[in-house]
Amino acid sequence: MLGFVLKRTGDAILTAFLVFTFVFFAMRLLPGDPVVAMLGDRAGAETIANVRRSLGLDQPLLVQYGHFLRDLLHFDLGTSLINGASVGEMMARNLPYTIMLTLASTVVGIVIGLPLGVLSAMRAGKMTDHTTRVVSLFGSALPDFYVGVLFLLFFGLTLRWFPLLGGGSSPFDLYHLAMPAMALGMLKGFGFVRLTRTAVLDVAGRDFVRTARALGLPRRDVVWRHILRNAMIPISTHLSLSIVATLGGTIALELVFNRPGVGQLLVGAVTSRDYTLIQGGIVILSILVVFVNLITDLLYAVIDPRVRAG
Amino acid sequence: MDIRLGARDVGSLDPAKTKTGSDEYVALQIFNSLIAPPRGTMDIRLDQLQPQLAESWEISDDKKTWTFRLRPGVKWHKGYGEVSADDVKFSFERQLDPDQGGVHGGNLKDIESIEVIDPLTVRFNLKQGNAFFHAQALTPGFGRFIVPKAAVEALGNDFNTGPVGSGPFELVEYQPQEGITLKAHEDYFLGRPPMDEIRFHYIPDINAATIAFIGGELDLTSGQRTTEWVDQVTKAVPDAQLIAIQPGSLQFLHLNMKVPPLDDVRVRQALAHGIDRSAWGKVFGEVHGPLETIVPQSFYGAIPLEEVPRELRYDYSPERAKELLAQAGYPDGFEIDAIISERDDYLTNMLMAQDMLRKIGVTINLEVQDHATYHANIREDKGTIVELSTGIAPTAPAVINEFLHSAGAVGQPSSLRNFSHYGNIGGSVDELIEAAVVETDTEKQLKLLHDAQLQIQRDVPVLPMQTSPLIAVVQGDIDLGYEPKGGFGQHELATARRVGN
């Protein structure tokens, strides 16, 4: 087991390193100049050259890469090219907002998706099932920014239940968190419905469930103990993947609700070619994703020894 | 009072380093310049200048020496003492040092030296006479605000987000990516502003800002320069006041004279005849201003239209355009590749031009690029027909120097935004414009400027399309205390107050 843990950890570190390197060079190969983006279209060539020099962007690419790695080893993500603020501090400020939105929307998604998915599977082929499937299929196809705007217009503007702007005083400000979490949670819920239905039907068709039914076990026991418990394995895998995807995928909702977050931060950074901020953001996100995947791998290995064998 | 800033965060609030229009918007409330145009305008005629920190001034006949007498007793925020001539000297000199990271030094490059005559008198000695020095270096915005020497030295880099000024509002708090809160400066020399507090919110997404304005969470927001947006907001908030500041952005097409067949003046004239400028008025309605020549009529030194001979106005005439193309050896027209930004104001204009020119046989194959890429590419001279949508100081010399002086041609160290290479490889108004800047006789100066514009009309290095006003809406219960007519879309809030309700 120790060997497995070491190998997977080594793989994770290598993966993260490759991601940083790729992002570093990819950003610089992209057309567009951070200094032109920063100074706007009014600046003259001399000013642009001065600012480029002051930011070290006139140095050879490999020298810049060396500085990047050196700083990284000192846990220094550098400063934003655009406003000189510490990238580490910007990430530390924004990440909690994204994490809270991810967790809150996941909870909403589970609350909506699991019961409806089970119900749909239990009533397979009946009207309830058809309705749930059609609604969830239609719902999953809705773009997130569109749902966000609808929520904003209905719950914010028409009903005036929630504020229209900003993330509030902290990431835990439920008044500001509720609307984006509901919008994103509803979309996640549609996905969970379909997944849960499939998982439950899959398990329900297996021999051991048929055996349990044939033995005359009460329906509730069959559903809860045998079907749901086993269906939870694919569902929980999907859940962890969904969390990872949401961490980097809250961009549209953060924009629509004008909520701080990593997504909004990175979109702004890409638009302005803020190399250091993009690098810093990707470093943090990739470490998070690699870490979640590593934990998932290790947990699987604990649950299922065949994984360790490779 | 709650106001939208369209940026994602502050670039810098240090006037020497402001990066975006949003930075400038906040700086305008915190700082003062020496002098200013009449409130709400961009009128830079010398006889119209208004006192700000300077209460009087003397300008030598040769426009080489500019002396300002400061108001006594003007207080800096946060107990940093009173505004002095030393502060003025310091504010400009720090920007001329390239190591300071200032970005507006180019506006001040005519300064030879700055002398402190006494604690309240300061003199600018210029390298050569410049009749437009005030417009370029002394009125509000773009590095022209006066900062307190003591505060800048004490705060160092913290001055970027913790500025100290002498203006109507002082900084209370900056919350990264959220906003900036200012409070009334009790000792403001023009009187304490009526608003106790101003809150600027960073809202990059226009939809989020629009909904917040309709919901009453914003008192003032900039808007999209489209008739649809204006209709939508004014219908949803019937008492909202629409502010359309002219000329806003100048929108025109540079014809890169290094690229055949744009190197042939007959081809450029043909393109000018092939563009129906009246189309922009029909499409953009109230979000439109005319631009018949490269300098808008409202700018100082613009040639009056009646002085432009008929044949140099390039009225819409596809027939004449085809004739000219045939004379140039392109009886069937030609195809040309061009890049363009995906930003709405760029793309819409270019698509309209593309459609019109198709009718005279000219096909523009467009490659749409993201805005940052587009600007980087045109700076590297990769453009053929280059569109620009941009604000600029409201004088003919500013426009011509920036876009048509040979020194500003892209691809050289002094490059500004001359994408056509006019003056570099064909035609030139360099001498006319240089003579106009040092000319102290107004009549002669205007003559030189008009001659330059006529020459440009003959050579057609650019195709003017329209001006696009900067659009903003204000809630009905806000009175700004003046009528905004011109500027860069930033509104002074020193006299803003809430009325009624």
Image (tube, coloured by chain):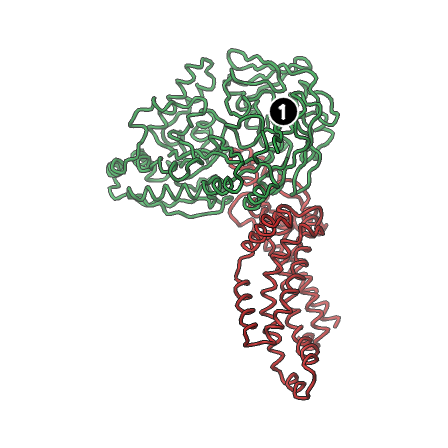
A280 vs A38: above or below: below
Residue at 71% over, 46% down:
A169
Is residue B460 something one can see in this rendering? yes
Q: Secondary structure at mark 1?
A: loop
Given the current orientation, which residue lies at the most extreme bottom position? A215
**Chain A representation colour:** red
Q: What shade has chain B been given?
A: green
Q: Quadrant of residue B211?
A: top right
Percent x, y of residue A214: 65, 88
Q: Is residue B405 left or right of residue A63?
A: left
Q: Nearer the viewer, residue B140 or A101?
A: A101
Image position of B148 (left or right of B68): right
Q: Nearer the viewer, residue B60 or B56?
A: B56
Q: Name the residue tied to disc 1.
A: B32
- Asked whether residue A266 appears in the rendered view, the answer is no
Which residue is located at x 56 percent, y 34 percent?
B476
Residue A203 image offset from top left, x and y in percent = 63, 79
Residue type indicated by callout 1: Asn
* Lateral position of residue A13 relative to residue B381, left or right: right
Q: Quadrant of residue B494?
A: top right
Looking at the image, residue A76 lies above or below residue B184: below
Q: Tell me residue B302's x, y (percent).
A: 41, 23
- For mark 1, does the 10 Å Cα neighbourhood hold few (<14), some (14 to 19), or many (20 or more) residues? many
